[in-house]
Amino acid sequence: MNTIYSDGYPIYFENSLDELVKFIEQGKYSRFFVLCDEHTSVHCFPKLQEKISHIDNHDLIEVSAGEECKNIDFCIGVWKMLIDFGADRKALMINLGGGVITDMGGFAASTYKRGIDFVQVPTTLLSQVDASVGGKTGIDVDSVKNIIGTFTQPKAVFIDYDFLSTLPERQMLSGLAEMLKHGLILDAAYWNQLKAADLTHPPAELIHASVILKNKVVLEDPTEQNIRKSLNFGHTIGHAIETWSLTNDRNPLTHGEAIAIGMICEAYIANKRTGLSDAELAEIETVINGLYPHYKLKHEAYENIYSIMLKDKKNIDGKINCTLLDRIGQFNIDNICTKEEIFEAMNHYAGH
Amino acid sequence: MNTIYSDGYPIYFENSLDELVKFIEQGKYSRFFVLCDEHTSVHCFPKLQEKISHIDNHDLIEVSAGEECKNIDFCIGVWKMLIDFGADRKALMINLGGGVITDMGGFAASTYKRGIDFVQVPTTLLSQVDASVGGKTGIDVDSVKNIIGTFTQPKAVFIDYDFLSTLPERQMLSGLAEMLKHGLILDAAYWNQLKAADLTHPPAELIHASVILKNKVVLEDPTEQNIRKSLNFGHTIGHAIETWSLTNDRNPLTHGEAIAIGMICEAYIANKRTGLSDAELAEIETVINGLYPHYKLKHEAYENIYSIMLKDKKNIDGKINCTLLDRIGQFNIDNICTKEEIFEAMNHYAGH
């Protein structure tokens, strides 16, 4: 699998940890910091440590795991550790983990001393296919997701397929939702490939293909003026459901589970508005419902979910902006959706 | 006085508040937010409010005044207010105040929803000659000054000389230190003009000239690879003394008072190392000591001040990097100074 070139940086897929060691050895960094969570420090860091044991000047920064750790308070903790370790402007940050680690680590690095270099080593399927490209960093404030962040590119991304072997199936499915999205908005052939594959363990080639698809979009429209908005498919409704679930469910939805619901809801609206056929809507629902457990979307939560939507970065002037589909493989951006349409779509999913 | 053009944005000096109103009227902003502190909301905002009373869609965000409010906690407060007000990506932030407001407001805006537009209306002499150019935003964490921030340019800067009429003399002198610095590092003729002027009320033309000097440096070297480091003169030692004073003195030094001390210390080292003549060192000391009260620099604080210096952004690999002078008007960057030299320079200032 070829190295993919994004906005000024490479994304490695083969012998990635060896490439990372080469990168460190060639860089003129004063010191480097590996940011882990409690899982990746156990399951992933040892594999890296083996390869860098000959290099001095590195420290581990460990934070707790989970979406709630993407909060500003944890980010302040990372900044304080960098200060205490005496990290200077030539320090390198290596973010080893899922999206929480790569997003928060990216934000911490991009603002520490007005910006130090960082690289991403995404260890979950979700972060490999989503957070690896696009240069978005972010943290949550008051459980508003990614409300604070920067657009800053990493110096390189290192994707190691083997890390996925320790990933629980539910986390695997979480990343899969983004892969399905890439097919639905951009490439019907890729969608068909996904349908035919064993999706509990997506082969490396399909992950690679997913990153290529996202990378094309991001390179063409880095500042999200037009086609990059395609990536928001399923996210307008999905993100809000995810946020709601995070603060209300004992066992909250994963990002992918929420996006899967969002994609069904937004495909439903697309069927009404932008010409997605009944057959394709049914196909999308069959594939998604075959992979993800049904979620009991409570009617009494709708208003709350809707008000979360209004706080979403994507929305301007109190209007809800959705990316829909013309057909599978063809997105359609900038559709202002009404509250009624959104409630109807959620009813459709929930079976109310 | 001509409008000065910096990195993609204008700095207005004439009829600045009218220019601001024009800017707001022409912009396609969904809403705007004026960030004030408790002083500028009383002394400065009414003057602006008069001119924008016909424009809807604005809100005031007020924070407490003082350097300690530049802390991340206050920044989180600003972010939360933006969230609560429902600020979207097309919102504009107007930072009306001194350096704390322009630095923190700039940081809050540059990271809210990954960046919204902001303009600066600096109301103190210090912020007019220093924070108005350069694109540095920043906040403090754990009393480490400006440790977190971004490089982000405002959309415009509006300098209104009349705001200075309500400024206490001590705050005036704080800004003056940066003007003196611009002369010392860049322009002997300007330094002579300053010496000849009534420096308790520097005329608008000298402020304008100071911004032109800083702007040239910043445009030539935006990322601080070489000549921009000239602006650090007096700051390596001065910043550390300022930080120490902030946490230890009942009535802490202003930024300018600390930089004034730093300039004497660093001029002393320059005299030993880079050829600044005895006569010029004496001249610098006479001017500065004639303007600023003597500060009792305690010997027992040296170690502490030195360890603050080690945490400074400018220093790489535990080495203290000073900008010195060859002569008045000619800086000399990248001088690694030893602990002994720094202690000796502080002794010289303190008269120990």
Image (cartoon, coloured by chain):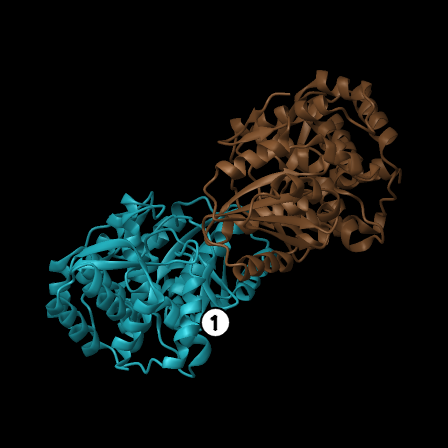
Chain colours: A cyan, B brown
Can the viewer see residue B109 in this picture? yes
Q: Is residue A116 left or right of residue B174?
A: left
Q: Residue at x 40, y 81 (%)?
A: A300
Image quadrant occupied by the N terminus of chain A: bottom left
SS state under label 1: helix
State the residue lying farthest toward the front.
B54
Q: Position of residue B149 (x, y in %)?
A: 56, 48
Quadrant of residue B122 within the rendered picture: top right
Q: Residue at x 58, y 30 (%)?
A: B11
Can the viewer see residue A56 in this picture? no
Q: Residue at x 38, y 51 (%)?
A: A135
Q: The disc labelled 1 sits on which kind of residue?
A: Glu
Q: Chain ID for label 1?
A: A
In the figure, A243 relative to B83: above or below?
Answer: below
In the figure, B100 relative to A352: above or below?
Answer: above
Image quadrant occupied by the C terminus of chain A: bottom left
Q: Residues within 10 Å of mark 1 (few under 14, many from 20)?
A: some
Name the foreground residue: A85 vs B212.
Answer: B212
**Residue with the mark numbered 1:** A68
Q: Position of residue B233 (x, y in %)?
A: 68, 33
Quadrant of residue A83 within the rendered picture: bottom right
Q: Position of residue B67 (x, y in %)?
A: 72, 50
Q: How many marks?
A: 1
Q: Position of residue B90 (x, y in %)?
A: 46, 48
State the residue lying farthest toward the top.
B189
